[in-house]
Amino acid sequence: MDLAARLSTDAPSITEAETERLRAAGLTDRQVVEVVLAAALRSCCSRVLLSLVVPPDVPPDLPAGLRQALLDGVGSDVEPGRRASAR
């Protein structure tokens, strides 16, 4: 998770040591690539949706901790579950 968070906030600072930690934890080179690609795609999609002010679709039965994690970084003017209007 640390690598995924840093990929979104400070990708140039990631070193071979971080990927080596994943390998030491048992991940193959292919799995390391999959982790990086998944984190990068998630970051990209999140930034696009935030830029377009698309509110997150929050399931009503989502536990409070997951709900907060989903809404972190979303502006207070965006109502969860409400679709952005066409402009």
Image (cartoon, rainbow, N blue to C red):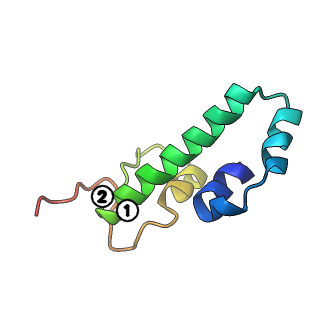
* Amino acid under disc 2: Val
* CB within 8 Å, label 2 to label 1: yes
**Numbered label attached to residue 16:** none
Circle 2 is placed at which residue position?
Answer: 54
Q: Indicate the position of residue 49 as horizontal and vertical percent values.
A: 35, 56
Q: Indicate the position of residue 64 as horizontal and vertical percent values.
A: 56, 54
Foreground residue, 57 or 7? 7
- The residue lying at 31 percent from left, 53 percent from top is 81
Which corner quadrant holds the C terminus?
Answer: bottom left
Q: Indicate the position of residue 85 as horizontal and vertical percent values.
A: 15, 60
Task: Assess disc 1: are there few (<14), some (14-19) or many (≥20) residues with their C-alpha within 10 Å of its C-alpha.
Answer: some
Relative to 43, say whether 21 is above or below.
above
Left or right: residue 22 compared with residue 8? right
Relative to 76, say whether 18 is above or below.
above
* Amino acid under disc 1: Leu
* Mark 2 to mark 1 CA distance (whole Å): 6 Å
Left or right: residue 71 compared with residue 1? left
Left or right: residue 82 compared with residue 63? left
As helix, strand or loop, the secondary structure at mark 2 comes to loop
**Which residue is farthest left?**
87
Circle 1 is placed at which residue position?
Answer: 50
- The residue lying at 66 percent from left, 61 percent from top is 12
- The residue lying at 21 percent from left, 59 percent from top is 84
- The residue lying at 41 percent from left, 46 percent from top is 60
Task: Assess disc 2: are there few (<14), some (14-19) or many (≥20) residues with their C-alpha within 10 Å of its C-alpha.
Answer: some
As helix, strand or loop, the secondary structure at mark 1 comes to helix
Place residue 74 in its image quadrant.
bottom left
